[in-house]
Amino acid sequence: MQLPRIASTLLFLLIAPHFSVGQSQVQLPDKENFHLFLLTGQSNMAGRGKIEPEDLVPHPRILMLTEDRQWVPAVAPIHFDKKVAGVGLAKSFALTLVEADSNITIGLIPAACGGSPIETWEPGGYHMQTHRAPYDDAISRAHTAMKDGVLKGILWHQGESDSHPEKSRVYEKKLTSMIYRFREDLDQDDIPFIIGQLGKFPGKPWDADRKRVDEAHQSAARRLDGVSFVSSEGLMPMEDGIHFDSPSLRIFGRRYAEAFLHTNEEVEKERGTLKRFHMSGFARKKKFD
């Protein structure tokens, strides 16, 4: 059903005349001020929350890359992996960032695929439910977006499809390999990678496999530089008991943003330290010569 997308388009045309809609869709900012974020994982990243009026209101400094790779104002649904795509966490994530810095515009790159196990997030992996190659598509879409802006971070929420005995035991190894691979293929070896916790919903205790996936998420944040873990404590599910509801997704997005800001600050400090180290080493070498 396409009503949410049609409604969002009509509302945008009515309340946002300051956007230049046309063949170019929007007027893009300078490349260095256009901060891009790659949205990866499965359905809780894509979002299945109920779309409400506030989700259809565009912000002049938050854009999204459409399925046909055009920049448009970001309104729900941001993802297009399945017809049930709804509200996700990305919009509140972006709102938190633009509120923190009035000079930037956020570009959201939707690439999550509902139901995708981590094995499909490898080069050549294919997900039958969405008829997509999740990893290859994400890399390709990111490179398209990076022609216009600067990739600042990767958001990841995934693991429900791997909470099974044969998959959970190898999840940590696959997750670590995937993080390194993303960084290598995007040519950013320290780009912040933000991992969200699986839903901890009332009346639905975790089994051993879900606990193992959760530990893999937290372990990655402890072991790997530039990787952070975002708690889902207190967040609530939709009636299906699987997906976060809309209010919880808005909270989750803000938590992701706070984690990113902290992680990015640490990454920038490390980059500065390395830069000073290399400059001082170069200066000593020149003096010695």
Image (cartoon, rainbow, N blue to C red):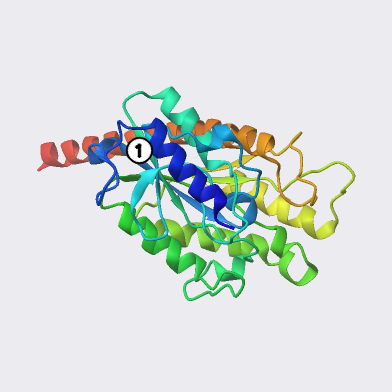
Write the residue at 55% across / 48% down. Answer: 4
> Is residue 139 at least partly visible in the picture?
yes
Where residue 152 sits: x, y (%)? Answer: 39, 43
Q: The C terminus is located in which quarter?
A: top left
Position of 126 relative to 103 (above/below): below
- Which picture quadrant has residue 237? top right
- Is residue 155 visible in this depiction of the protein? no
Q: Nearer the viewer, residue 88 or 276?
A: 88
56 left or right of 289? right
In-image side of 116 versus 285 (left or right)? right
Q: What residue is drawn where x is 37% and y is 61%?
A: 68
In this view, the residue farthest toward the left is 289
| Left or right: where 103 falls relative to 86 | left
The x, y position of residue 86, in whole percent, is 60, 48
Q: Residue 187, located in which quarter of the rendered image?
A: bottom left
Q: Secondary structure at mark 1?
A: helix
Name the foreground residue: 197 vs 134: 134
Residue 101 sits in quarter: top left
From what the image shows, is residue 168 above or below residue 59?
below
Q: Is residue 223 above or below residue 248?
A: below
Disc 1 marks which residue? 271
Residue at horizontal 28 percent and vertical 33 percent from the top: 276
Residue 210, horizontal then vertical, whole percent: 78, 56
Q: Amino acid at mark 1?
A: Arg
Judge the density around disc 1: few (<14), some (14-19), many (≥20) Cα neighbours within 10 Å.
few
Residue visible at 12% across and 40% down in the picture: 286
Residue 247, percent across and down? Answer: 67, 34
